[in-house]
Amino acid sequence: MIVLDNVSLNVRDGWKARPVILNVTLSIPANRRIALLGGLPEQRNAVLNLISGTLLPTKGRIVRKSRASFPTTLTRAFDATISLRSNLHFVASVYDVNSDELIEFVTSVLDFGPDFDKPYQNLPQDIRRQLVQIVALCLPFDIYIVNGIFSGGPKPLRDAALALFDIRSQNSGIILNSRNMRLATKHCEMALVIEGNSLILCNSTADAATYIDIG
Amino acid sequence: MDTDRSRRSNALLEMRLIGSITRKYAYYFSALLRREQHSRLSDPISSFLEVMEPIFLIAVMTAATQFIGRRDTSPLGDSPVLFYATGFFFLYYFIYLSNRMKRSVDNPTRRFPMERRLDHILVHILLRTTDYMILGIVLFSLIYVFFSTGAFPNSFTYLFMAMISAVMLGFGWGIMNLVLARAWKLWGFLFPLVNRSLVLFTGVVFLVDFLSPGVRHILSFIPLVHAVALFRLAFFPNQPMIVFDLSYLAWTALLAVAIGVILERITVRSESLER
């Protein structure tokens, strides 16, 4: 369960503060597949960052009674100047998993060759994006924050990411950021809708359709 | 009996919980340290140049006083190298502590959720201190061997106190500038210049005590003047004590930490997304 207690988030727009969400109070179940719908892309990203803990709310508090993953598009959290191996060591250390197993899994998905020990920034952008998704889905969380459905990048990485997503969505909670209603209906059973500056939790994706106007 | 037993088991559980949290934080903090160290090793030239800046300035000032002939004796002690080394080494420790704090604290969306700004600041302080400890040992050992036996500190207590004051002042000043640079982007560029200009006002290349009383009085408001004097006191027992005020230094250092912590807490929520 992730509890948002009177949460507001402002975005700095020059000298002014512009609200993304305002005085939101709700409880997000950790064991359900939830689509994040509506609002502007930057609003959805901000909400995902808030839920994961990457951003702190401007006002109010968020209580995480379950382990939430980092957003699967958090490519910039990997240090670009150090190698992929060092980055994986770091992630494994801070999330308390066996780093050898994590490295073994990542290298079994795609043979990086010498690039594995070269600065992470040398890897192509699409590979980096897929890698972060795979790493996020590899780690044990109660709820996974998936930012967009997997596309682009080499096929082995994409397939691995999709396979991991399928496994995780069977046993854990998912918050899927998507503006595609069909995808949301296919993968999720509930919806979190951004309506103006508020968040509405709907018991089904069909209910969410009444709030939004997207295909 | 039962209540005693349940109280004891509760206390045991609490201790285990605290132990587990402490252990997790230690793992996380050491992982941050390792990553930062790897990151710095990936660009050894810039790290090397950063540390070499005070060495370069010591060499330039010593050469200027020795060969150009403006002054052929040290303002304090028997070696100009040692005098300038004690000034530049200490001031640059402070400058790098506060200057590079901004670099260590980046956009929050570039970090994993559990990475907090204060942790990055602490990692930065720890690594800079390690750098400067190594640099200090090498620098003062070389001065001891080639220039003056006075390079071995007379008082490690003063040395330690001076370094602690630099950390405290650097922490507070660094966070103040972090906040100012967020509100006013230009400050981010001006700040390193302001910091380096301290060379002219903190008694690094001269002794503040020998200035006219009016100037001395004005400069004595700068806490670093006292910190530099304290650092020098560790090497020169005959360091003049006209300006030096230990209680002023202690209070300003404590105030700097308090302001730093308060600002950090106040602004941690506003380090939000920027459009």
Image (cartoon, coloured by chain):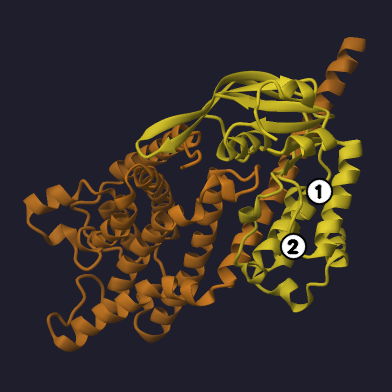
Q: Amino acid at mark 2?
A: Gly
Reading the image, the residue beneath label 1 is A137
Q: Position of residue B239 (x, y in %)?
A: 25, 62
On what subunit does the disc labeled 2 rest? Answer: A
Viewer-nearest residue: A63 or B153: A63
The residues tagged by marks 1 and 2 sit, at their Cα atoms, a distance apart of 17 Å
Q: Position of residue B72 (x, y in %)?
A: 17, 82
Which numbered disc covers residue A166? none
Q: Is residue B29 visible?
A: yes
Q: Position of residue A52 (x, y in %)?
A: 68, 37
Q: Amino acid at mark 1?
A: Leu
Viewer-nearest residue: B19 or B193: B193
Reading the image, the residue beneath label 2 is A153
* Secondary structure beneath label 1: helix
Callouts 1 and 2 in the same chain: yes
Colour of the chain lettered B: orange
A61 relative to A150 in the view: left or right = left
Whether B48 is drawn above or below A184: the answer is below
Colour of the chain lettered A: yellow
